[in-house]
Amino acid sequence: MRLLPIIPGVCLTFAMCVPMLASAANGGCPSGKSGPQPLPPATQAKGEVDVHVEAEMDLGLEAIASPGWRYRARTVTIPAGVVIPLHSHDKRPETVMMKHGGLTIYELDCTVGYTMQEGQVYQSGHGKQHWAVNETDHPAVMYVVDLVSKDSFPTSTTGNGETETGSGH
């Protein structure tokens, strides 16, 4: 169990911290910038994302009684230059907190890309589609908590350009 002193006296574990911070979410499309994204979406992954599962909980065994669903907490590291292609969160809502670095997010319903900075919280759920690019010279590290029924997110490309799947952002 990883202890994080983000909210002293209240936040005891990683999985407890990120959802509690969601109410203070300061990431997302900037005010007044809603509308169609003018850039074509990135549809191909570039580079590899390092994903470490910190904890998982089978929600079929919990009071919520949702067989096949897991509550998952991960640390995700996105090296400089990596592109996470367009994907939907219709079936995998998430809350993300940027620990180190920055990551530019491009949403289909936002006219500008915006950069998640250290300490910012971002949420994505039903109806949201985005892609992300680490446009900095340093790795971006974030904590991700999500509800997931299957792992199907593309996270890297093979030598021949084909997309592999795994536990991505």
Image (cartoon, rainbow, N blue to C red):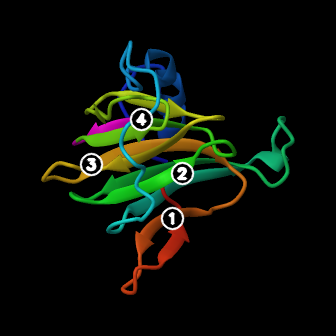
Cβ–Cβ below 8 Å for labels 3 and 4? no
Question: Given contact means CB atoms under 8 Å apart, are the residues at marks 2 and 4 in contact?
Answer: no
Among the two numbered marks 1 and 3 on one chain, the one whose residue lies closer to the N terminus: 3
Picture disc at residue 140: 3
Residue 145, given in percent of the width and then of the height, sits at 54, 41
Q: Is residue 99 magenta?
A: yes
Mark carried by residue 37: 4
Decide which of 56, 9 is in the foreground and name it: 56
- State the CA–CA distance, disc 1 to disc 4: 22 Å
Marks 2 and 4, how far apart in space? Answer: 14 Å
The disc, 3 or 4, on the residue closer to the chain's N-terminal end is: 4
- Looking at the image, which residue sits at the far bottom? 160
Instruction: Give the amino acid at mark 3.
Output: Ala
Q: Crowdedness of circle 2 by 10 Å Cα count: few (<14), some, many (20+)?
A: some
Mark positioned earlier in the residue sequence (2 or 4) = 4
| Mark sitting earlier along the chain (2/1) | 2
Q: Is residue 120 in the magenta section?
A: no
Closer to the camera: disc 1 or disc 3?
1
Q: Which residue is mark 1?
A: 154
User: Which residue range is magenta in the image?
Assistant: 97-101
- Circles 3, 2 touching at the beta carbon (< 8 Å): no
Question: Chief secondary structure of the magenta span?
Answer: strand
Instruction: Indicate which disc residue 16 carries.
Output: none
Q: Are marks 2 and 1 in contact (CB under 8 Å)?
A: yes
Type of amino acid at the residue the image marks with label 1? Pro
The residues bearing labels 1 and 3 have C-alpha atoms spaced at a distance of 18 Å
Numbered mark located on residue 87 in the image: 2
Q: Amino acid at mark 2?
A: His
Amino acid type at image mark 4:
Gln
Residue drawn at 21 percent across, 57 percent down: 80
